[in-house]
Image (tube, rainbow, N blue to C red):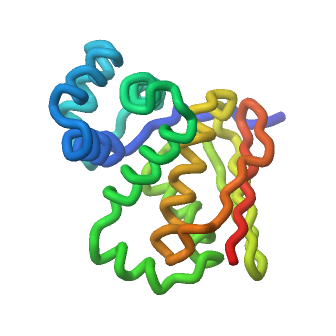
Amino acid sequence: MTEPLLPSEVKGLWFTIGRRYVLENYGQDALDELTAHMGPEHGLVVTSALPSEWYPEATLQHTLAAMNAVLARKNPVEFVRIIEEASLLGIHHFFRALLRIVPPGMMLRKIPTMWSIMRRGSGHVEVETGDNTGVVQYSRFPYFDDTLYRLLTKGAIQSMMTLCGTPEAQVDLVKHTTDTLTVEVRWP
């Protein structure tokens, strides 16, 4: 018998970074359109989230859908680019400098720690690395049937590879089920 999944929550930092990214790159009108697209309950989180608070996963789902529709115009490549840029913005400058000296394999092995900082509830991450490859396996997270969650993961991992000096790394979404995702990463 498997244990029941706990409700998933997302750290408010995700929303404060998203708000800053939209304002800096698209302006107030785009933020207004984005939050209107989300509806009052979820849009309010984007405009007033506190970095240290926890918010329901449904708010992130609405945010991703709004970003996809309003900013990326439902273009998957553009959506991944936006996620990658927003992820880069979210990393403090000191931490960014430190990450430039971290090899790609070590960077990938930090994903479970980063996951636990930004999320709570169900969800598990395992990472295996080789010389120039890595596999990130997500499980017990029931949102991977949503294409935007898979693209979010790809963009976030691409940003990590950029930060450690391997922007040419290949990040491939290999397979998924409702609650699992396997990502392969290769770098020169």
At which x and y percent is residue 67? 40, 30
Query: Which quadrant of the figure contains the C terminus?
Result: bottom right
At which x and y percent is residue 183? 72, 53
Query: Which quadrant of the figure contains the N terminus?
Result: top right
Q: Is residue 152 left or right of residue 174?
A: left
At which x and y percent is residue 151? 58, 41
Nearer to us in this view, 56 or 24: 24
Nearer to us in this view, 61 or 124: 61
Nearer to us in this view, 73 or 83: 73
Residue extending farthest to the left is 28
User: Residue 23 lies in what quarter of the image?
Assistant: top left
Q: Is residue 14 left or right of residue 136?
A: left
Residue extending farthest to the bottom is 101
At which x and y percent is residue 161? 55, 68
> Compared with residue 38, is residue 16 higher up or lower down, i.e. above or below?
below
Residue 25 in view (yes/no): yes
User: Residue 40 lies in what quarter of the image?
Assistant: top left
